[in-house]
Image (cartoon, grey):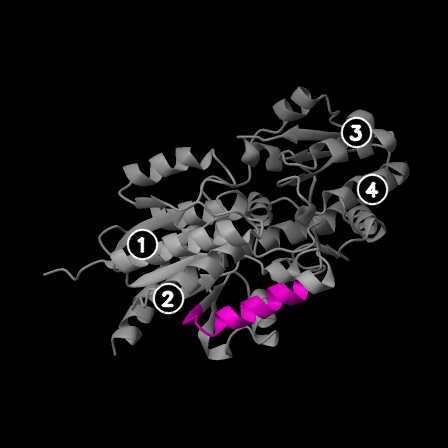
Amino acid sequence: MAPEPIRIAHVLEATAGGTRQYLMDVCLGLPGERFAQTAVVSCERSPAFRNDIETLQQAGVAVHEVPMTREVSPLRDLRALLALRRYFRAHQFDIIHCHSSKAGMLGRIAAWLARSRAVRIYSPHAFAFQMDEGWLRRATYRFLEWGAGRITHLLICMAPSERELAVRARIIAPGRALVVPTGVDVRRFHPGADCSALREELGISRQHRLVGAVGSLVPQKGHRFLVEAAAMVIEQMPHTSFIIAGDGPLRDELQARVAELGLGRRFQLLGMRDDVPRVLSSLDLFVMPSLWEGLPYALLEAMAVGVPVVATRIPGLVDLVEQARTGWLAPARSAEGLAEAILRALNDPGLSAMMAETARARILAEHTRERMLEQLAAVYQRAVEERAQ
């Protein structure tokens, strides 16, 4: 007889962006005959996630909703904690895998309070104490992560630098922290997409070098530094245009700054796009000016498409971008440093193209979605077997 499938509950509040993509990749990608998966999720952050719920249910993934908020809210957080505890008491799981900071905290505590025998796994997707907050709030987040680490059986990080950060901060013992690198769908993201139509659509001359970014317009992504850097780059290389694909609460602020700097149509905010592979293929250079990250899909996707990249020197990005080997690095929170890296990349297209080829080869070898799922499945299997001993 075939063994019973491993019962996994994924707990996620951050149902948007990369964490949403990760949840969908795992829930839809792991074989159903080996893993019976449940998504314990909140739609508070992104009501549009309800469309994904339908997709999950059609694929045989069970879904249970628990309202959770991103912001710290003692009353609402307590309600969510109690709801999660009730659910874990009523349902037996072999693994409870909590994703990102809020669900990571609530889910692990709830599983512990429910006395669930499930293996408690946590994937931070970037720690909250990395955020651009005041020192007191960062210290509080770090203390909370340290406390929750005492009841965590296993920490699964997206990148080696994230694991190093966790161990250095004493979040968890080294023996209970491992890395399963994020993987991308290389069948969707690959070189060769037609880019001429997009340039024509946007009114961008073929003679212009096109620099772009993909991501939510939120403080984390550092797009304000890209706008500032664009003005410096255009001053030295007039035949350069910039685009950002994505939307978010900072859209009006960024658009106002574009106008203040007189960039006009030279810096376009495209909003949400459903043709990201085509957008990436249209670029001469991809820029990720983030302030903190886990291991972002956008950077993986750009590398898979074969676009030269510039990224900030932060955990999660330095694992992918090696200076003068797979891309160009720039200091975080520095428009001047970012502009310098962009200019170096654009002024040496031959070297940038060679690095893009090296980067794509690395993605194909180490960061495919299939490889990620294989490694994660092995981790789940081993965790359950060790728990049973």
Q: Nearer the viewer, mark 2 or mark 4?
A: 2
Picture quadrant where residue 152 is located? bottom left
Per the image, label 4 sits on a secondary structure element best described as helix
Q: Looking at the image, is mark 2 or mark 1 earlier in the sequence?
A: 1
The residue that mark 1 highlights is 87
The residue that mark 4 highlights is 228
**Where 68 sits versus 50, above or below?**
below
Q: Quadrant of the N terminus?
A: bottom left
Per the image, label 3 sits on a secondary structure element best described as helix
Task: For label 1, count other residues whose C-alpha is less than 10 Å away and answer few (under 14), some (14-19) or many (20+).
Answer: some
Determine the residue positioned at 56% across, 75% down: 167
Distance between the alpha carbons at the discs numbered 2 and 3: 55 Å
**Where 241 sits versus 45, above or below?**
above
Q: Is 152 in the magenta?
A: yes
The residue that mark 2 highlights is 113
Across and down, in percent, residue 268 comes to: 73, 29
Per the image, label 1 sits on a secondary structure element best described as helix
Task: For label 3, count other residues whose C-alpha is less than 10 Å away and answer few (under 14), some (14-19) or many (20+).
Answer: many
The stretch of residues the image draws in magenta is: 138-154
Q: Nearer the viewer, mark 2 or mark 3?
A: 2
Distance between the alpha carbons at the discs numbered 3 and 4: 13 Å
